[in-house]
Every structure is written in C-alpha cells, then in structure tokens.
Amino acid sequence: MTGRQQWAVVGVVVAVLAVALGVASHFMKDELFPVTIGSTAPEFRAKKIESNQYRASSDFKGKVVLLNIWATYCEPCKIEMPSLEALHKAYGDSGLKIVAVEIDPSVTDDSIRTYAKNLGITFEILHDPTHTIEKAYQTTGYPETFVIGPEGTIRKKWIGPDNWTSIGNRALIAQLLGLATPRSAVIGDR
C-alpha cells in the first residue's frame, strides 16, 4: 500500500468517526449536555396569558429569574405557589423576576388566569402548551424550578415543591440580587 493510499484510509476512518460522533451527540444530547447547576440557561419562549404576546428568556437578560415549570392539575404545584408569591412580594421590587410557565395543552389562558387569581398570584405566568420549555430544560416532573443568575447561569435546580421562603432560598436570592442579607423581616423565618 502506498503512502497516498494509507492517507486515504486514514481520511476515511476519521470521516466515519466524525459522522459517528455527530450522530451520537445528537441522539445523546441530554446525557452529554444536561441542564443542571452551572450550565447556561436554555432559551425559552412562551405565551403571556393576558394577551397573544410572547415572552422570551432574552426579555429577562441580566435579571435574576426564578423559572417555575408547572401545571394547573398538579397538587404539589398548587401547594408551592404561596411561597413563590411570598418570595415575589419580598424581592420583586429588588429585581427578582418570577416566571411561572404552565405547560398543560388542555387548559385555556382564561382558566389559568382564574387559577392564579384564586391563589392570589401576582407574578408573571406564561403558557407553553407545546412543551418546548420542558424539552429545552429537560424537566422530569412538576413543579420543576430553576434559579437563574443575572449572567444566565443556572444557580439552583429543584424538582418538586419547595418552600421558597426558607432561609436558604432567601439567602440565595439575596446574594444573586446583591443584597446584604435575606429579608427575614418581610416574609418571616420559616
């Protein structure tokens, strides 16, 4: 075999390996590149329930965002909502953006608005019946919440309901907002 033929064989092997690597990375993307603490928050887009307008993750660039993915039929989601509202009241004026994205395609924007009104929710609620946000964030259940720092990095990922007014959660939010201490006087120690 000549040197030229050897290089041709090497070139074919490298090309086959490159194609195999590309195919494997496409099909194993979630395993190779999981959405977790320390990763860049994926882009998202969802419909506002008040209008036919959409919000995108780029609308919150440079902000501290608590992204909550939930469904109206989810009881743990309903249990968690009051603590999200309390966190919103404590830190919303300081720059915290709580964005709750409802994912059920069988509910209407009107029913989501009624649901939120009955719970006294005042933070932003979006609707993504296409499940695009679930795919982007690789969610495994509801509720699933991501705290995103102003630089766009996921700082906390939580599967299931959480007490967002806990000392640890308030300390994280205060730190990301650049506040000296958690606002325990505003929402009480729990």
Image (tube, grey):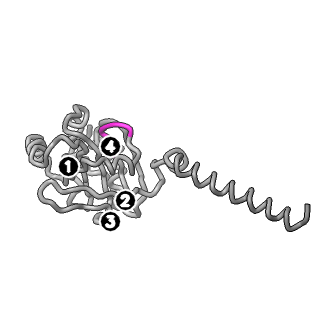
Report, in whole angstroms, how far the alpha carbon at label 1 lies from the one at label 2.
32 Å
Answer above or below: position of 105 versus 62: above
Q: Secondary structure at mark 4?
A: helix
Answer above or below: position of 16 versus 151: above
Quarter of the image with the N terminus is: bottom right
Residue type at the position of mark 4: Ile
Residue type at the position of mark 2: Glu
Q: Between disc 1 and disc 4, whose residue precedes?
A: 4
Q: Between disc 4 and disc 3, whose residue precedes?
A: 3
Q: Are marks 1 and 2 in contact (CB under 8 Å)?
A: no
Question: For mark 4, what is the residue?
Answer: 167
Residue type at the position of mark 3: Ser
Q: Between disc 4 and disc 2, whose residue precedes?
A: 2
Report, in whole angstroms, how far the alpha carbon at label 4 lies from the one at label 3.
29 Å
Residue at image coords 34%, 37%? 141
Question: For mark 1, what is the residue?
Answer: 186
Report, in whole angstroms, how far the alpha carbon at label 2 lies from the one at label 3.
7 Å
Between residue 61 and residue 104, name the one nearer to us: 104
Question: For mark 3, what is the residue?
Answer: 58
Q: Are marks 2 and 3 in contact (CB under 8 Å)?
A: yes
Report, in whole angstroms, how far the alpha carbon at label 1 lies from the one at label 4.
12 Å
Eye-nearest disc, 4 or 2: 2
Q: Position of residue 93 (x, y in %)?
A: 20, 60
Question: For mark 2, what is the residue?
Answer: 43
Boundaries of the magenta span: 140-145
Q: Between disc 1 and disc 2, whose residue precedes?
A: 2
